Amino acid sequence: MTATMEKTTAAPSGLLNTWRNLRTPVRWMLYAFFAIFVLTIVQGLPFDDTERLTAGATASAMLRRAVPIMLAGLGGLVSERAGVVNIGLDGMMVLGTWFGAYGALEFGPWGGIVLGLIGGAIGGLIHAVATVSFGVDHIISGVAINIVSLPVARYLSDQIFTGYTGGSISQSPSVDATSKFSIPLLAGGFGGPDLLAEINDWDIPVLSNIADFSHGLFADVTWFTGLAYALVPAITWMLWRTRFGLRLRSCGEHPTAADSLGIDVYFYKYAAVMMSGGLAGVGGAYIAIEQSNIYKEGQVVGRGFIGLATVIFGNWRPAGTALGAALFGYIDALKLIDIEGSAIHAFLLVIVLCLSGVVVWAVTRKSKVDAVLAGVMATAFLTWYVLSDSIPSPFVKVAPYVIVLLVLVFASQRLRMPKADGLPWRKGDH
């Protein structure tokens, strides 16, 4: 009897260990496969006549809409890893949109990227001077930057853009985006075969859906977009595989201990906050150059704050931050291509399935409160799905925030922010 019980309890543990021993890229691929599988099942139900959940157009739109949020999130991540909360990301993105559009107008799109980075880094420098050198509360300094950035951009537009044809105090002339490319072999890049399109034509359930969705990710991607996503592994490597990253993270965990080891805490905090502003500025430049092909007042619409939400969603990790940005981008993409609202309505069922998974997870961990709470929410969303044919537009706008709140509710015990994040520090403090 005892041996049988030992075998029964050992099996899940062995399966869990096997899963944990898989390489991170393999696990992410399996996550993606499972996500598309769930979306395929949901959109195949007779209740919602839609195939947009896994359409290539949805994937392509998601890829573009997620970039500014992801860059802002990566900026907030770097800053908070050094112990400085950067609420001013939104204002730094505003500066990035203006400088990015001006740079693209004068020097081409790549010049716009560089100037957008510089514009955001200037905002980061101001935030670092206020918080690191003068000890101003991080929230107050960030809010001040958000408030000041809008009139600064308007003033610069009045001084410069009004002198161009098509420019005004609230917008720039149109600018050019970077060129596009497709991945060779997978999406027909450089004149090669288009493997994913061929698999999609086979019309095999799930497999063809995965191919169609992947084709949207790999075909006709701008170089600016590719550069943005390449920053995720680059920042991961920088923070966890370099001496610079180790010292930067130590300043966010225990700056006094770092100082005692001879680390220049002020330097690393300044570097992190300026990097944070630069990344947010590049995100702003992306909005002006790639998404809109024009600078227009008010086009950031709070993406910096959404970026901060993805930092928490991703547990202060670059890959998790990118995943959170993809979630926001996916919902945003559905809003763009789903005029009738059928895809958003079908997505309610996806939320129900996710909450059902949370119930199972909570039961295995003997967490009665989480299990009951997730069960009640799943029942509420299922009722909404059954009794409605479409989704009100206000809910569509707040859907990503609702999902992030759900993640925070059920994963709050697993989230861990840097210990000294947001705390003032002076050399010699103990």
Image (spheres, helix red, strand yellow):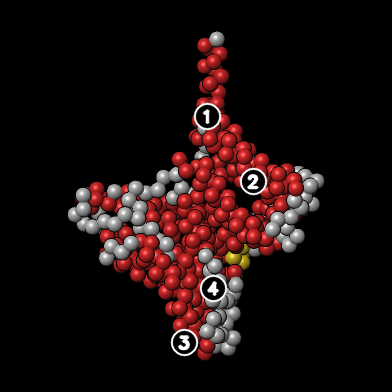
Asked which quadrant contains residue 399, the reply is: bottom right
Q: Can residue 417 be seen in this snapshot?
A: yes
Q: Of label 1 and label 3, which has the lower sequence position?
A: 3
Which residue corresponds to mark 3?
Answer: 159
Which residue corresponds to mark 2?
Answer: 351
As drawn, 360 above or below 425: above
Q: Position of residue 381 (x, y in %)?
A: 66, 45
Which residue corresponds to mark 1?
Answer: 366
Q: Which mark is residue 298?
A: 4
Dot 4 surroundings within 10 Å: few (below 14), some, or many (20 or more)?
few
Q: CA distance from mark 1 to mark 2?
A: 22 Å
Which of the pair 188/265 is nearer the observer?
A: 265
Q: Of label 2 and label 4, which has the lower sequence position?
A: 4
Q: CA distance from mark 2 to mark 3?
A: 49 Å
**Which structural element holds mark 1?**
loop
**Which structural element holds mark 2?**
helix
Q: CA distance from mark 3 to mark 4?
A: 18 Å
Q: Of label 4 and label 1, which has the lower sequence position?
A: 4
Disc 4 to disc 1: CB gap under 8 Å:
no
Q: Position of residue 308 (x, y in %)?
A: 47, 57
Q: Position of residue 71 (x, y in %)?
A: 49, 61
